[in-house]
Image (tube, rainbow, N blue to C red):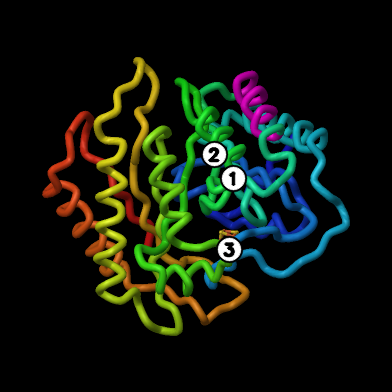
Amino acid sequence: MEKLNIGPIENHRQREEGVLIYPVYSRRSQGLSIGINLFPDHKRCSFDCPYCEVFPFRQDTPFSLELMEKQLHAELSAAQNRGMRVKDICFSGNGEPSLAPDFFAALDSAARIRDELVPDAALVLITNGTGLLKDQIFQGLRRAASGPKALHIWLKLDAGTAVWYRLMARSAVPFEGLIRAIKEFVACAPITIQTMLCAIQGKPPPQAEAAAWEGLVVELAGIGAGARCRTGERAPGIQDVQLYGKARPAPEDPLATALAPVYLAERAASLKAALEGSPLPRTRDAIPIRVFP
Ligand code: SF4
């Protein structure tokens, strides 16, 4: 029988060994997640997050769609043979997936293989959102995120102010333009917000940053709140919010450090109160907020 080489909880270190497909137990998916790495040869990202877990590496083997399909098929078949339920197939890997030239072709292939072998599994993209600044990617993701078995988009929103964004993303992509693109996208597609809460050089996000982030999430929640969809589809707008802490080693440690779980819980409680107290139109249940310290 084929053997799955599953890493410990969200241990993605196999990615630096040049693998295209890596099964992990994901705490955020709460089950077996099959990761797809579009950058097996080197990291490629439009952000340079101080907590990024991708350690420096270099491999000779570039991404191959054919190999990805073959390996994805093999891993999903192995999981099935062992009676294991696959919760999701997740585009993550060594960088920003939407920067990969083969991204949309890989997405189509993964969706086809998912439908064939594990039709109940979700298809997930973890993105920093910078691809939304390109019209082709914006429209491609909008289309991929619609329909009953659509792509789930987990979008990074680590900052509510340009100051904290500079520290958290260290990116040439301007904060204001990125937020504008995210607002436009939320108006036409469902997304999950993912926010890393950590200290930088020992300092937690300032109070003004926490308040601005909260205000931004409430504003984003309002943008999609009035939309309606056909049965079985998810309406545009924020589906849920994930707050997560620094739980694993990073090459730049100790630049970014973990905050106390109680801090994350307080931020979640504050956001919940802000969402409940906002005058948003209510067309669906309250937005779930999940915390992963
Ligand atoms: S967006 Fe993701 S891959 Fe890119 S630097 Fe940040 S944590 Fe690393």
Of the residues shown, which amino acid type is indicated by label 1? Lys
- What quarter of the picture does the N terminus occupy? top right
Q: What's the CA distance linking mark 1 and mark 2?
A: 6 Å
How far across and how far down the image is residue 100, in percent?
A: 70, 46
How far across and how far down the image is residue 225, in percent?
A: 26, 35
Whether label 1 touches label 2, CB < 8 Å: yes
Which of labels 3 and 2 is toward the front?
A: 2
Q: What's the CA distance linking mark 3 and mark 2?
A: 18 Å
Q: Residue at x 21, y 39 (%)?
A: 286
Q: Which residue is mark 1?
A: 134
Q: What's the CA distance linking mark 3 and mark 1?
A: 16 Å
Q: Which residue is mark 3?
A: 47
User: Relative to 145, does residue 97 appear above or below in the rendering?
Assistant: below
Q: Residue at x 48, y 36 (%)?
A: 152
Q: Main secondary structure of the magenta part?
A: helix
In this picture, residue 146 sits left or right of residue 264: right
- What quarter of the picture does the C terminus occupy? bottom left
Secondary structure beneath disc 3? loop
Is the residue marked 3 within 8 Å of ligand 1, measured from its CB? yes
Which residue occupies the foreground of this view, 178 or 282? Answer: 178
Secondary structure beneath disc 1? loop
Q: Which residue is mark 2?
A: 138
Highlighted magenta segment, given as a residue range: 106-117
Which of labels 3 and 1 is toward the front?
A: 1
Q: Residue at x 38, y 46 (%)?
A: 183
In this picture, residue 66 sits left or right of residue 99: right
